Amino acid sequence: MVKNGGREITLLGQNVNSYRSGKTDFPKLLEKISRLEGNFETKFMTSHPKDFSDELIKTIAQNEKISREIHLPVQSGNNQILKKMNRGYIVGQYKNLIKKIRKNIPGVKISTDIIVGFPTETKRQFQNTVKLAGEIGFFQIYAAAYSPRPGAAAAKMKDDVPAGEKKRRKKIILDLLSAHKANKKLIVILGPTASGKSSLAVRLAKKFNGEIVSADSRQIYKGMDIGSAKITPKEMAGIPHHLIDIVRPDQDFTLAQYKRRAVKIIKDIQRRGRIPFLVGGTGLYIQAVVDNLKIPSVEPDKKLRQKLEKKTNQELFNQLQKLDPSTAQKIDQNNQRRLVRALEVCLLTKKPFSEQRKKGRPMFDALQIGLKVGLDEIKKGITGRTEKMFEAGLVKEVGKLLERYSANLPAMSGIGYKEIIFYLDKKTTLEKTRELISLHTLQYARRQMTWFKRDKRIHWVKNYSQAVKLLSQHLH
């Protein structure tokens, strides 16, 4: 199947994780399948909580080809009802299993089955189930009203919960799920620079009653407007925009600070009944929010930073490769600020940065939409935008910034600023500066596309109507 281009393998069974054939149990079976060559994902259902072993959790965590969506039926949140169902576990054991799964499998999404109106189930016992569902926050719940099944032990019991009451209880569970999902919706609009994602996001936010949270590591700086292609009040079209113009170019601003602010704003937007749109091209900012990255809380060390900032980007990158090859493989080699921060964390904690930045339990039900634009179109957009920057007074903007701030600040190393500084130092011509800005921006766009292509959760669209269709499905 995989050789013929199959992309999904689904293992089915009533208690699929109880599988055993000779010396091969279910975790070993999953390992064997994962070793097959090809680009595919393995899913399985339905699992029984009592047989969801530590070995199975470990196997899923260590194999990227195994789905991070796990269906784990709880059926009830009351111990007495679970005993009558002959489930073989109690509520506390189920909750501990969920904690263990979430701790060891970052980003996991857990769905469940719940039966309402099981024989003798009282209103108080049902409320235990409602409480459990609220505490765990399932990704999906499949609720069903109890009906006798011939041959099952429960069929001998009196079906004493009225049909109307079963219907009411089922609605309560499904309403709880809907409320949980509605309160956690997040729309992400991403793509390479000059792809048109900002204008797309504004149109979508208008249609879906949204507000925009910027995920652009350059637009955070006050006074750096033209070179960062900062969205103008006119382009905002009345849509509230957040996390733009929040720090001075000489102020430190870490990924942890960004995440903390972004999450607070997103939750506030949701609380007010509106839809948050996380919009930008800084992949790490987006990942920090979507994957709830656990970021090391290491305070900036000014002396160490000053020492590191004296080195070239290549020297910083070479040092990072020795200390943390994993981070070096993913980082933008031309982003001095990121290189310095990664090295700072490594040197101060004496641990690789990558080992300290792990995924946590997702805070939001995120839909990631990428704007798919051809390279030729991006090139054209970059060239046109560079010309507009010069017409808008980029040289003058950089000159004013240099009157207040050092040219050696990490903020001044961004594309559009470092090239103008080079020109103002009379080290190149204005025409050559234009060419360099366009070239460096194109190189950056390529790096962005490489970053985003790694995330298979992103839905790529070509236009507004395709994006509207995806949002409508996600929000309703």
Image (cartoon, rainbow, N blue to C red):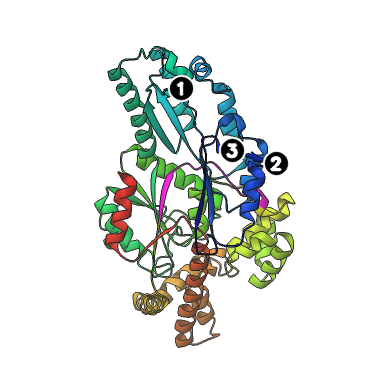
Residue at disc 1, secondary structure:
loop
Identified at 74% across, 64% down, the residue is 322
Please say whether residue 360 is one of the residues in the magenta stretch: yes
Q: Residue under circle 2?
A: 22
Marks 2/3: CA distance?
15 Å
Q: Earlier in the sequence, mark 2 or mark 1?
A: 2
Image quarter hosting the C terminus:
top left
In this orientation, which residue lies closer to the viewer: 422 or 137? 137
Report the disc number at residue 151.
Answer: 1
- Residue 297 picture quarter: top right
Q: Earlier in the sequence, mark 2 or mark 3?
A: 3
Q: Residue under circle 3?
A: 17
Residue at disc 3, secondary structure:
helix
Q: Please state if 456 lies on the left or on the right of 194 as rendered.
A: right
In this orientation, which residue lies closer to the viewer: 332 or 113? 113
- Residue type for callout 1: Gly
- Residue type for callout 2: Gly
